[in-house]
Amino acid sequence: MSLSIHDASVPVLSRALSNVAAIVEKGRLHAESEKLDPAVLLGMRLYPNMFAFTRQVQVVSDTAKGCMARLAGVEAPKYEDTEASFAELKQRIDKTLVFVKGFEPRQLEGAESRAVVLKFPNSTLNFTSGWDYLQSFVLPNVYFHSAMVYGILRHGGVKLGKSDYLGSIGSG
């Protein structure tokens, strides 16, 4: 039995988004219990030239929804990137989860071999197939920015461990 692109994307991205949502919630609870201004954690970054926490969460969301839209050949929902609270970030992740989980295998038929072009303001990335796009761009980016979400809050004093990043394991 071979792995479908649906099985390699929807459950994997959903799990990453769910884990980020749980980390965001721990950040909210930490700020509340420690009487911290949430803006301090939301604006934290690991190094001056890296994205702040809020932007890291937005990139996880954008990468996941953009992936599914490109693989299915549909328009991705547009989010304004105006989140200024943990609650707003959680809402964004929840909306993204609904979008990602809404895809059926039949909607991704042909995506395995269809080329994907990703345009940025200063460059264009050309992927030979949906698999190439998913494996060489989407998953590494989702994991990188998810790790930054974890790392920033951990650095900010939020009590997080590896299990927060990985989520529940061995149950599937």
Image: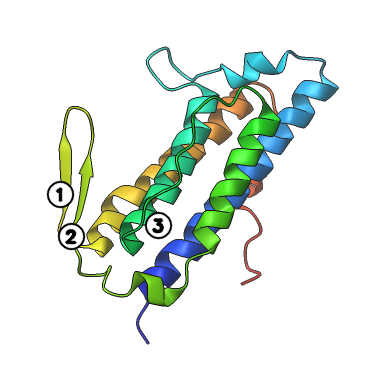
Badge 3 or badge 1: first in the primary sequence: 3
Residue at x 63%, y 53% (from the top left corner): 167
Of the numbered discs in the image, which one, if any, rests on residue 166?
none
Whether residue 33 appears in this view of the structure is yes
Residue at 68% from the left image edge and 44% from the top image edge: 22
Q: State the mark number for residue 115.
A: 2
Q: Report the number of numbered marks.
A: 3
Question: How many residues crowd around disc 3 within 10 Å: few (fewer than 14), some, or many (20 or more)?
Answer: many
Q: Element type at marker 1? A: strand
Q: Closest to the observer: 57 or 62?
A: 62
Q: Earlier in the sequence, mark 1 or mark 2?
A: 2
Between 94 and 3, the residue placed more toward the observer is 94
Determine the CA span between mark 1 and mark 2: 7 Å
**Residue 143 placement (x, y as % from top left):** 44, 45
- Judge left or right: residue 126 versus residue 107: left
Quadrant assignment, res 116:
bottom left
Inspect the image, locate mark 2, and give the three-letter code of the amino acid beneath it: Ala
Say whether residue 61 is left or right of residue 41: left
Amino acid identity at mark 3: Met
Q: Is residue 165 visible?
A: no
Residue 119, compared with residue 106, is above or below; it is above
> Residue 107: percent from the left, percent from the top?
39, 71
Residue type at tag 1: Asn
Q: Residues within 10 Å of mark 1 (few under 14, many from 20)?
A: few
Query: Which of the two labelled residues, at mark 2 and mark 3, occupies the earlier sequence position?
Result: 3
State the mark number for residue 126: 1
Vertical placement of residue 25 versus 106, above or below: above
Residue at image mark 3: 68
Residue 104 is situated, as x and y percent measured from the top left of the image, at: 47, 72
